[in-house]
Amino acid sequence: MILDHKFDLGFFPTPLHRIKNLSEKYAPYHIFIKRDDQTGLASGGNKTRKLEYLIQEALENGCDTVITAGAQQSNHCRQTAAACAIAKLKCHLLLGGTAPQNYNGNLLLSHLLGAQIHFTVENRKGEDIYSLKNKLELEGKKPFIIPYGGSNITGALGFVNAVKELKTQLIAQNLKIDYLFFASSSGGTQAGLTLGNDLYNLNMKLIPIGIDKSETQGLSLEEVVLHLVNEGKLLLNLKKEYTIDEVKINNDYNEAGYGVITENEKGAIKELAENEGILLDPVYTGRAFYAMMDYLKKNKIRSNANILFWHTGGFPANFYYADQLK
Ligand SMILES: Cc1ncc(COP(=O)(O)O)c(C=O)c1O
């Protein structure tokens, strides 16, 4: 089966558990959390799941080098650097902005994990990947490109497999999830969860929270997700017609812009930390968790529902944003 074809990088299954204190506070809602902050790859995160499939493909293609891209505080880039270390691949990261005086958060970890870092000023979504690939090929290297956020169909398979993992846990815990909240930014997580939800008949209502309203190569995030889902359904032999409505993203919470930390994200981080001892990140999960709490406070979903928050990691970025989180 296509989903078994992967290179092991993390510790799975990640825990699925109820968050007791917040469930009491927001009763009659029952809140659960899926701990992909605990995937184990150089401080965890959702990209570990994607990288298991992407690194497998790189190795099968006989590549010796990986190139990927993101923001300076990219969790994807940090996990890619760690994955390359394990798989003995050279890692090149193209990161937006200019070289800072001090390295901090994910950037520091990517450096410690052995990645070669290139600063690409206004380009943080992989616009310079092909020119670096050509240069490395002239030097005799065999580079493998991992797109921005690891969000192609190979990477998205990681989240189809994640739903399979979730299903096993739900059966064991005798649990049915009604609503699933998570952060959506480059689309691979959402595409995989959408396909997995249908493939494994979990019938969860997905509520993706948009983090970054800017387009990727001229496409909106919903268009990117729809493309991935349509590609994936053929691979998985899933008989379903998807429309843009099925991949709708809630963009009500990203007005401040990507990576801009407001009282919302700070408040959400503190609420989960102070009540449950679990740490979110300020860019992705802090925003998505704030959105979920807002739904609950405003009774936007039916009472008594079982709600799952998919914790996609990102903890190291808290150190970079320390001043805004004080
Ligand atoms: C912590 C965290 N959560 C969520 C996401 C969003 O995942 P995706 O890019 O697959 O939409 C990312 C992506 O970088 C992330 O780092």
Image (cartoon, rainbow, N blue to C red):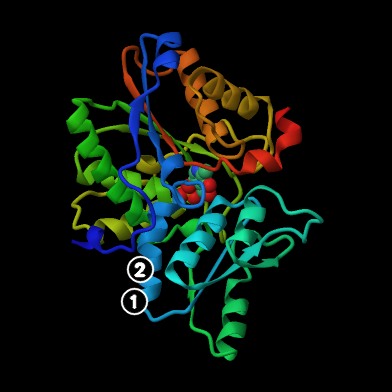
Name the residue tied to disc 1.
Answer: 60
Residues under labels 2 and 1: Cα distance?
A: 6 Å
- Decide: few, some or many residues near mark 2? Use Cα within 10 Å; few <14, some 14-19, many ≥20: some
Query: In front here: 99 or 83?
Result: 83
Q: Position of residue 189 (x, y in %)?
A: 41, 48
| Residue at 23% in and 59% down | 4
- Decide: few, some or many residues near mark 1? Use Cα within 10 Å; few <14, some 14-19, many ≥20: few
Q: Position of residue 119 (x, y in %)?
A: 71, 65
Q: Can you say whether 198 is above or below 20 in the image?
A: below
Label tally = 2
| Residue at 69% in and 59% down | 96
323 left or right of 173 in image: right
Query: In front here: 166 or 177?
Result: 166
Mark 2 element type: helix
Mark 1 element type: helix
Residues marked 2 and 1 touching at CB (< 8 Å): yes
Name the mark on residue 56.
2
Query: In front here: 151 or 317?
Result: 317
Image quarter in which the N terminus is found:
bottom left
